[in-house]
Amino acid sequence: MSKELKEAVLSLQNADQFKALALEVFQYQAKENPVYALYLKALNTNTKEVKELWQIPFLPISFFKSHKVLCKHAKPKLVFESSGTTGMQTSKHYVADPDFYKVVSKKIFEDVYGKLQDYTILALLPSYLERENSSLIFMVQHFINHAQSTSGFYLHDVESLVKKIKAALLEKKKLLLVGVTFALLDLAEKYEIDLSSVIVMETGGMKGRRREMIREEVHALLKSAFDLKKVHSEYGMTELLSQFYSKGDGLFSGPIWAKILSREVNDPFSKGTNRETGIINVIDLANIDSCCFIETRDLGKINVNNRCFEVKGRLDHSDVRGCNLLIA
């Protein structure tokens, strides 16, 4: 069943198909995912009465810390684990089909930016490289495998990275520099480089290395140092297999099989999905083997008509984590 659902995800064409498939996946996971099934039972949810997307209960993202969120017939081949400070309980996403994740992430990127094979990808992701089981490192490594041979990761040897950037610019190669926010800011302070022809993409996260800053402040610093008109961003998380990209101004959009909804800030069980500003709920149909209906702890502003959204920060007392978390 999961194989057929994954094929249906990749063949989606429009919003009507999305709604029908999302409701089908809901019924599937309500039966096959023990954790989600217990959560629905605790809410006294009559699954047979769920006919609209706004009626679907979203599983709080914290369950990925305390439970093994996985469908019964899925056998995990790897585990993605979120970042966290020492002693912090981290989220774990048990992935049964890494090859599907590779297909999904590659398709999302190429639908936005074009073929990976045309790019030199330089990755400045020190905090992620220093730990195991990062979904971001897994994804970027997959991208590098399909990109130009001059692509690669950089940990502490920033001078080599700068040399590689300058060489790629001289050869007029299509260049993507993807980095965790604090590392890009460190680079900006040490080197003033004309990267006006480069896609500079921040993935968010200070990781305790710098004070937290709002997105506008971070982007202003990067644009000034690198002579950029726009700073690109990636929004993703350990608990989701899909990513959302912004080509500037913090406006994110995602694949046809994912949808961003919102709920009231002070009412976790509020119904309705078209609020302009609220807590971000995500339907990610790529999560067939885990749970496709996730309530995050991110605050967002949604533009329903343009299918895009902004990330405004985190709820009070929520864990500060990477993947585009820039807070006031």
Image: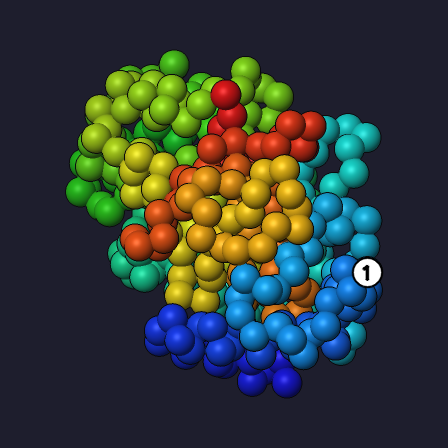
- Residue in the picture at 34% in, 42% down: 251
Q: At 73% from the left edge and 51% from the top edge, which residue is drawn?
A: 64
Q: Residue 54 versus residue 159: which sits nearer the camera?
A: 54
Indicate whether 192 appears above or below 198: above
Image quarter for residue 71?
bottom right
* Secondary structure of residue under mark 1: helix
212 vs 90: above or below: above
Q: Disc count in the image?
A: 1
Q: Quadrant of residue 191?
A: top left
Drawn side of residue 250 relative to residue 39, left or right: left
Q: x, y percentage for residue 158?
A: 44, 26
The amino acid at mark 1 is: Ala
Visible in this render: residue 32?
A: yes
Q: Quadrant of residue 6?
A: bottom right
The answer to whether residue 159 is seen in the rendering is no
In this image, 243 relative to 113: left or right? right
Question: Residue 50 in the image: x percent, y percent?
Answer: 62, 72
Residue at 73% across, 46% down: 62
Q: For the point 33% across and 60% down, which residue is it?
A: 110
User: Which residue is denoted by mark 1 in the rendering?
Assistant: 42
